[in-house]
Structure formats: C-alpha cells, structure tokens
Image (cartoon, rainbow, N blue to C red):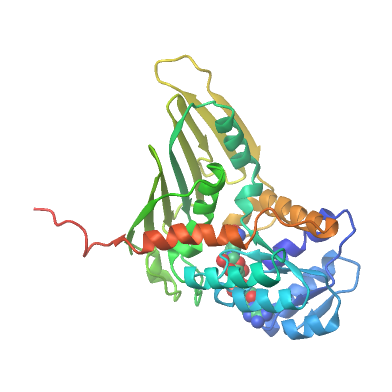
Amino acid sequence: MHALHAQEVAAASGGACVVTAMVEPEPGRRERAAAAMRGRQSSELHVFESIDQLLASGVSDACIVSTPTDLHRAHAWQLAEGGQRMLLEKPLTGTLADDREFAAQLDAKHPTAVMLAFQRRFDAPLAYGKQLMKEGAIGRVFKVVSILEDSNPAPDGYVSGGILPDMSVHNVDEILWMLDGVMPERAAVVGNCLYSRKLSTAVEDFDDAFLYLWFPGELSAQVSVTRNHVSGYRVETWLFGEEGQIHIGRFEHRHLEVMVEVYGRRDRKTPIEKRVFSARDYGQPLPEFVDRFGAAYKAEVEEFVRRCVAGEPFAVTHRDGVRAMEVIDAGMRCVITKESSGQVG
Ligand SMILES: NC(=O)c1ccc[n+]([C@@H]2O[C@H](COP(=O)([O-])OP(=O)(O)OC[C@H]3O[C@@H](n4cnc5c(N)ncnc54)[C@H](O)[C@@H]3O)[C@@H](O)[C@H]2O)c1
C-alpha cells in the first residue's frame, strides 16, 4: 500500500510536495521499493530501516503509514510525537479498546495528526450514488447493503484481528458516511469458515461473514464480507428506498468498469439511470482492490496533501475509525456460528 500511495504524492500536490523518504525494515522489500520509487522521481530519496531514523533525519513533515494493523498505534503515536501529520491505513488499531484509548490520547495531544484512510469516501461511483439518494431519487431509504468480497485469502502470515475489523471496517464506514453519521443501535454477526482459510497461513476467525445492523426507525444495513469470491473482486452497494433502488458496482468480470444504476418502482415508468465509471488502468498487474479503488486512493492522497499544505484539519479522522469499530465490536459480541445456530429438525 505504501508504494502505491507514495507514487501519487508529487502529482497530487502539483509538485509542491515530494517523497523525501521511505521506511522499510525488511531488506528485500526495502531494495525493491526504493528502486521503484527512484525510478519514478528525480528528487533525492532517503531510505531508512526504522521510524527512529526517519524522525532523526528531519526530512519529512507528513507521512503515509501503511504498516501491519497491529503496529498502527505504536507507529502513528511515534510519528505524531515526532511532529508528523499522517495518512494512516485502516483500521485505526484493530480493536475497540485500543481504538478508544488511542483516540483519547490523540484528542488530548495531537487532535489533527491523523487522517484515516477510508478511501471509499473519495470514490466517484459511491459519491454519485450518495448524491442521487440525497436528491430523493429513491425516496426514503430503509435498507443499505454493502458487499466486499475478495477472491483470495489473506496472504500467508497476515495478522488481521478478524475478518470484520479487517474487511467490514470499509463497509461500515461507507454506510455511516452514506447515512450522514447516523449510528446503528444494535448489531449481530453470522460467521463461517468455508474455503479460503485452507489456502493461507493467515489466522483469521472466519473467511465468510455477515453483519446485520439495526438503525433507529425502520432502517437496516447488511454487510457481507468474504475471501471466497473466487471469480474476482466483488464490491457492490445497494440502497433500497420506498420509490426505487440504487446499485453501485456490479460483478461482471469487467474489473475496470464500475456501474451505477437507478431503478424506479416496478409499476412506474421511471427511466433507469445508468452511468459507467472507468476505473483507473495502471497497465500492470496489481492487487484487485487497486483496480477497483485506484482513482479513490489517488483522490484520497490529493485530499491529504491539500490539507497538509493548507494546515487544515482532516475531514476523516481517528474518530471515524472508532465509530466504525464500535459498530463492528457490537456485532462481534453477538456472533452466530454453526454451533450456536438453531438446529433443524
Ligand atoms: N485501504 C485499503 O484498501 C487497504 C488495502 C490493503 C491493506 N490495507 C491496510 O494497509 C496496512 C498494510 O497492509 P499490507 O497488505 O500493505 O501489508 P504488508 O504486510 O504487505 O505491508 C506492510 C509493510 O510494513 C512494513 N513494516 C513492518 N514493520 C515496520 C516498521 N516497524 N516500520 C516500517 N515498516 C514496517 C513491512 O515490512 C511491510 O513492507 C494494513 O493495516 C491493512 O489493513 C488497506
């Protein structure tokens, strides 16, 4: 992720910012990433083995932090204490207890240090769907369905803290953002291990899970996450309203196209609105999430750089990470598995 984000910085700032340094403790990765970065930029690149070295060098004002989730808190705090603002990959820390503690620490000492990397907020198809919903295209919304399905297991050795904190944190933040911050009152999870966990040494609770959310009034949201969508990456959002439905993204094996469709009620001749967004083509094989969200990652880095240059607070912060984790944690306290489900017969 860090190499991907880093390549956007100079272009995103119109040349006002450059990547001055990278930190990578693992020698092979360090050499490969440094060579790739140097191939892309003419300005000097310092290469460090540790954050200590980076901070001692004084060559940066802001950072992009894309280290393993269980290290986010320590790294982000060290960088904030060292005077850096940062774009920090999701999730904030991986657990609600740590999120809350860390957010309180940040609020007290470095309230504007962290922009949390929820790239869906910068995704044009999702933003268009949200705009149509807010303009009243489908009437009162009563259900949101958000689906994130990987075609592969987590990589060997990956430490995620669970499929829900790792994957559904994107969906939950998307739903809270779609609904302008309204929080659900209750949550429940159904989880299962079906297939892909056998293909990787990553240890994770489930490879397939469903999160159901009850909001105040007649409104629900449903999140489906899995690492078993073997035919390719599936990212879809459905907004159900009393007057119609909006569908954002459709799995069709056309991974560089994202379609937004609006349907009216069955008995009305509402024209179906359809717009196809072209995903960014990097012209090289990249992880499937980059195909779908490449333009959103770029827009996210642009926003990060713009706010840093202007000295403005970020619009997506550690507090958004805590909110999403509060929802996930509530679901994880009410998990139905095969053993705890109702017996048939
Ligand atoms: N926003 C998204 O769509 C998205 C997609 C993938 C991953 N992520 C997030 O990005 C983060 C990283 O995931 P990944 O798949 O790139 O993991 P990864 O393991 O491929 O990369 C992590 C990198 O951090 C390096 N690292 C480890 N310890 C370090 C230290 N002390 N100092 C500096 N670098 C250190 C590792 O050597 C490695 O190169 C995770 O938190 C994950 O949730 C977000």
Q: Residue placed at 72% from the left, 74% from the top?
A: 80
Q: Residue placed at 37% from the left, 65% from the top?
A: 206
Q: Is residue 343 left or right of residue 285?
A: left
Q: Is residue 282 visible?
A: no
Q: Quarter containing ligand 1?
A: bottom right
Rendered image quadrant of residue 56: bottom right
Q: Residue placed at 71% from the left, 56% from the top?
A: 314
Q: Is residue 239 left or right of residue 64?
A: left
Q: How many circles with numbers are drawn on the protein? A: 0
Out of 54 and 151, give the one closest to the viewer.
Answer: 54
In the image, residue 151 sits, relative to residue 55, either above or below, namely: above
Q: Position of residue 28 (x, y in %)?
A: 69, 82
Q: Is residue 199 left or right of residue 191?
A: right
Out of 334 and 266, give the one closest to the viewer.
Answer: 334
Q: Position of residue 259 (x, y in %)?
A: 57, 36
Out of 227 and 335, give the one closest to the viewer.
Answer: 335
Q: Position of residue 272 (x, y in %)?
A: 53, 22
In the image, residue 189 sits, relative to residue 160, either above or below, namely: above
Q: Is residue 295 visible?
A: yes
Which image quarter holds the N terminus?
A: bottom right
Q: Position of residue 50 (x, y in %)?
A: 72, 84
Rendered image quadrant of residue 20: bottom right
